[in-house]
Image (tube, grey):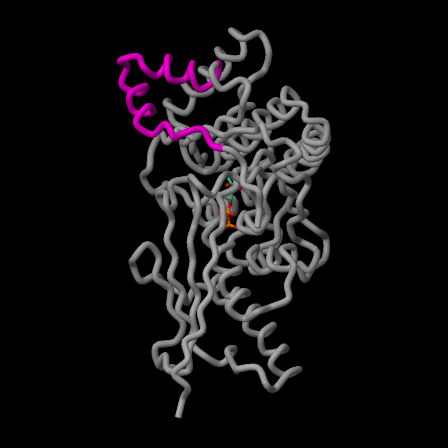
Amino acid sequence: MASDTVYRASTTAPVNIAVVKYWGKRDAKLNLPTNSSLSVTLSQADLRTLTTASCSARYPASEGDSLLLNGEPSDVSGARTQACFRELRSRRAALEAADPSLPKLSTMPLRIVSENNFPTAAGLASSAAGFAAFVRAIANLYELPASPSELSLIARQGSGSACRSLFGGYVAWRMGDKADGSDSMADQVAEASHWPEMRALILVVSAAKKGVSSTSGMQQTVATSGLFQERITKVVPKNMELMEKAIAEKDFPAFAEVTMRDSNSFHATCADTYPPIFYMNDVSKAAIRAVETINANVGRTVAAYTFDAGPNAVIYYLEKDTEAVVGTFYHVIGDTDGWKKDVLKGLKPTMSLDEGV
Ligand code: DP6
């Protein structure tokens, strides 16, 4: 008789927004990147994924593993999700082999229930929080003695940017150089408390699902863009160095310049992809101009924009400059022009960084 026990664990994971972007895979199967990247983890009060993993011998084996995402059944047969299940199960199986008194959770079907409190696939890094929460919920359920860096190795295989959502604060994903990917993982560059004045404002230009997914967009860039070589060999290594220094020294103008230059460089390689990929629209470009206007009016760099694979802008600034940045955005956006009203609808509250887990 199968035991009736249902084993369960829950966790939440935050969203991260890269200031030095990951764009390009050197190994699509292991999800290994062509460059290192660096991100800021945002507050879970505003954006997070909440995931519960459960397993039981009474779950019918014929139904296999399942995932309910925002209330809808979601396919788990994809290679990325399967890789995460496989990695986690084999670690649990090793524990069970070492200690036969442990329940054989590794052989039971898994049920995962996951909810985002923000639009999925709207360029708001939902896959990052999603896979980070997915991996940690199962790791907690399996009581794996794994560090966040070790879990980041697994989450990376679900979605590259997810490996950075296992940490709070300022986080680097080191690309590594081993063929098996065992050194391609995230680490914390600085805790949120090191530079707690950092804020992010999200301008939701469009909550619609994005046109070209990151996964396929970056593959097209790797295959066709000449500019991309320059980016991965020269631009990003330099930006990583400058960014780590800016964070260590809490130098906002330097942080802002690298953030904006790196976003521009990433979108330039997208435009250099053949056929070209455009993630930013006219509203996004107007947001760039608004940031330039704010910085010029204040007379120093108080705001930095960055865009992922979608039109939404993320604006980084320091708490003390809230009035100049958010106040001005409200003022500018308060205009009656069409685009300004659209952006205003999506203006999110000021967010602080996440302390991590
Ligand atoms: C532009 O992590 O979504 O947001 O590994 O294929 O799942 P996959 O890609 P994903 O790409 C994120 C790209 C980016 C930049 C970044 O977050 O570093």
Q: Within the magenta stretch, is there residue 17?
A: no
| Residue 270 percent location from the top left of the image | 50, 34
- Where residue 26 sits: x, y (%)? 62, 51
Seen in the image, is 238 located left or right of residue 350?
A: right
- Relative depth, front residue between 59 and 314: 59
On screen, residue 191 versus residue 107, left or right, reads: right
Q: Against 266, is 117 above or below?
A: below
Provide the major secondary structure of the magenta segment. helix
* Residue 147 position in % (x across, y down): 65, 59
Q: Which residues are magenta?
A: 324-351
- The question of residue 336 being in magenta is answered with yes
Does residue 28 appear in the picture of this structure?
no
Quadrant of the image occupied by residue 114? bottom left
Q: Against 135, is 258 above or below?
A: above
Residue drawn at x 53%, y 20% as measured from the top left: 303
Is 288 in front, or is 329?
329
* x then y, percent, for residue 238: 71, 32
Residue at point 58% right, 27% down?
A: 197
